[in-house]
Image (cartoon, rainbow, N blue to C red):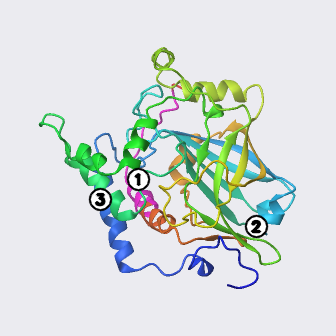
Amino acid sequence: MNSKQTQNEPVGARGGAGVESSTDQDLAQQIFDTMIQVHGERPGYRPVHAKGIVCQGTFAPSGEAATLSKAADFQGDSVPVTARFSAGPPDPFIPDNSPDAGPRGIAIRFQLPGSGITDIVAMSHNGFVVGSGEEFLALHKAVVATDPSKPHPWPIEAFLSTHPRALKFVMENRVVPASFATEAFFSNDSFVFVNKDGARQAGRYQIVPVAGRRDLSEEEAKTKSADFLVQDLKTRLATGPIKFHLVVQLPNAGDRTDDPSLVWPDNRKSIDVGTVSIISVAADSAGVERSIVYDPTHLTDGIELSDDPLPALRARVYSLSASYRQQGEPTSILKAA
């Protein structure tokens, strides 16, 4: 091990993104082709997290950020961000208070000095639904094959019965948040942070609401409107910014970095690297939403891919999704919001 490496640097992390194989491309195509068969998907929209709203804001790094990474957005000056909040399913009209609307998502684009960018893609569940692309494909095939008119066990039930972390993911995402401003988000994927001295440290992003976390009871959720999260966001922004701590959780020796479905314990060290302030809804939210493609492999010098295989695979699927949704003309969900 190089003296500037840490014991938590994953094997194979030094090369960054690396070269995508034909097998990776084929798996991404299979995943995408299956995702667009899921009930509720509509041409012109994202095949997941279809319902969303785009906001503008800033990121101000903390004093500790530069000790972790030499990334330009960690170096002292605030930078603009474009963030998209979303519901998880492919249905762009799913009610915000539906127990089937999770996981919620946040994607953040940091506009770096000059013309550079870096993205974070995160969701409201700590731990991804599965740990590999092959399992993700199997999950979506089970969803597509499930016909509620047929006898149990359905294909999705059979899949979840043999994948306990996926079952936990599904059950825990049925909770409805009180607000986007009181929801926490997790990247789940691991990255490698490199500081100016060359020290390398694996970590995962957590986006923690300054206002604290709060979910609704089932009874409270039933009283809410179909677009209450969007309306609440606008109401809050009318009185001031919504703020989140951007935290990087660090693994202990032995914590796996190659499987995003495995959650690191809460007692692991974390570094608060700054504050994301959401200031306003984008003037043309629907237009920005249609054109912007968030990508977990959009990285800057000082942040690299780890041995986690999913960011590169997700980037390929997102690229296919972007091309697909350009073929349709989605109806804006914000006109009445």
Q: Which residue is mark 1?
A: 325
**Mark in front: 2 vs 1:** 2
User: In terms of secondary structure, where does tag 1 sit?
Assistant: helix
User: In terms of secondary structure, where does tag 2 sit?
Assistant: loop
Asked whether residue 193 appears in the rendered view, the answer is yes
- List x then y, in percent, for residue 241: 76, 34
> Which range is magenta?
318-335
- Pointer 1 and pointer 3: residues touching (CB < 8 Å)? no
Q: Residues within 10 Å of mark 3 (few under 14, many from 20)?
A: some
Q: In what quadrant of the picture does the N terminus appear?
A: bottom right
- List x then y, in percent, for residue 9: 64, 73
Please give the label number shown on residue 128: none
Residue type pointed to by label 3: Asp
Residue beneath the point at 40% across and 40% down: 170
19 is within the stretch colored magenta:
no
Between the C-alphas of marks 2 and 1, the distance is 32 Å
- List x then y, in percent, for residue 252: 65, 62
In the shown orientation, is residue 197 left or right of residue 251? right
- Pointer 3 and pointer 2: residues touching (CB < 8 Å)? no
Decide which of 247, 320 is in the foreground and name it: 247
Q: Earlier in the sequence, mark 1 or mark 3?
A: 3
In the shown orientation, is residue 189 left or right of residue 266? left
Between the C-alphas of marks 1 and 3, the distance is 13 Å
Q: Which residue is mark 2?
A: 71
Q: Which residue is mark 3?
A: 33
Residue beneath the point at 54% across and 65% down: 256
